[in-house]
Amino acid sequence: MRPTRTATALLATLALAAAAATGCGEKEETLEPGQPREVSLMLDYFPNADHAGFYAAEANGDFAAAGLDVTIRQPPDPAAPIKQVAAGRVDLAISYEPEVLRARDQGLPVVAVGAVVRKPLTSIMSLPKAGVRTPADLAGKTVGTAGIDYQSAFLRTILIDAGVDPDTVTERNVGFNFTPAMLTGRVDATLGAFWNYEGTQLRLDGRKPRIVRLEEAGVPNYDELVLVANQETVEEDGEMVRAFVAALGRGTRALQRDPAAGVDALLEANPDLDPRLQREVVRVTLPLFLPPEGRPFGWQDPTEWQEFTAWMRENEILTEIPDAGGAFTNEFLPGQGL
């Protein structure tokens, strides 16, 4: 897989009145007509199935109906989205809950305004020949990570929870080359590959990957992907944020009804993608695009944010912020904060 061209959102000459996606925990909102508001969104990576809801909203005209002229950009590197939002160079970005908390700890004015994927996709992954069925089987093994500090902390937490001495496990930095590292035997397992993406690709290739989900192995639950805005944008242009999240919610609900249509829009934006893989990744990830029952689209659980923040503080990844206060808000979700 390699980065490809970005896509430009559907242009609209007139914004239409539209209602936010309706469902449990959500109420109808009216979006006022007017001149389209230009909005820039930076992805966390090249366009792929994790972004299917955004491309469905674009293809369905949901952003246009919300009065938004959205341009979707691809980042020059994975660290760019948070920095670009903090500097005000883009209006919104997709990032990760750990990165939002780290940015807040460094004093950057960023806020998560909605969950895009509400559980960890990062996982422990291995092939059958490694003999790793549970975290306890990692004793004496070599585990590949991307060299990110909180991945190392994930691994230590999981090992201790499983009763394994962390000193018996070798951690090796393989960058983002998780699959090659496993296939070549350079590592016995990886911690960093996404179970929904690399795991699905290995499964479709007949490799029978063994996957341990982080939230089932001792790591507090967190939102893998979140929509991020600048604090100033939240305070001064909250209606844009609200309209964007509502439109994304409608696009994601449409994706739920007809996944094929959403994947087709994604493939149009990034023709280099494998259609079979993208369709299967959307299928297995779709439940995590949607909110818990009784909650509005994009819901971020306050208790989980606090628990994960406490975990990051305990592991000395955060040193300045005392808790998750200010790092996220549910104010701009459908039916909230009105």
Image (spheres, helix red, strand yellow):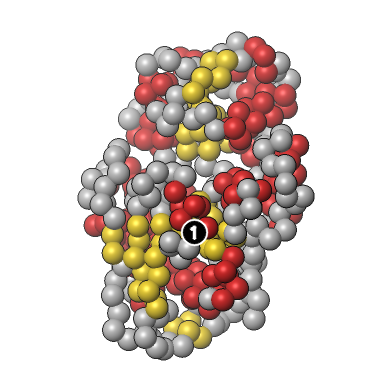
Residue at image point 43% right, 15% down: 186
Q: Secondary structure at mark 1?
A: loop
In this rendering, would 146 be left or right of 104? left
Residue at 40% x, 28% y is 177
Residue 51 left/right relative to 157: left
| Type of amino acid at the residue the image marks with label 1 | Ala
Asked whether the viewer can see residue 269, the reply is yes
The image position of residue 110, as x and y in percent, is: 58, 58
Looking at the picture, how far across and down is residue 142, in whole percent?
53, 15
Q: Residue at x 46, y 88 (%)?
A: 32
Q: Which quadrant holds residue 15?
A: bottom left
Horizontal side, residue 281 vs residue 106: left or right: left
| Residue 221 vs residue 71, the one in the foreground | 71
Mark 1, Cα crowd under 10 Å, few <14 / some 14-19 / many 20+, is some
Q: Choose between 303 and 170: the one closer to the eye.
A: 170
- Quick check: can you spot residue 115? no
Query: How many numbered marks does the figure carry?
Result: 1
- Position of residue 130 relative to residue 98, above or below, is above
Quadrant placement of the N terminus:
top left
Vertical placement of residue 115 versus 59, above or below:
above
Nearest the viewer among 313 and 194 is 313
Q: Which residue is mark 1?
A: 87
**Image quadrant of residue 209?**
top left
- In this picture, is 66 found above or below 40? below
Residue at 44% over, 83% down? 18
- Residue 241 place in picture, x, y as percent: 52, 71
Q: Position of residue 297 (x, y in %)?
A: 56, 66
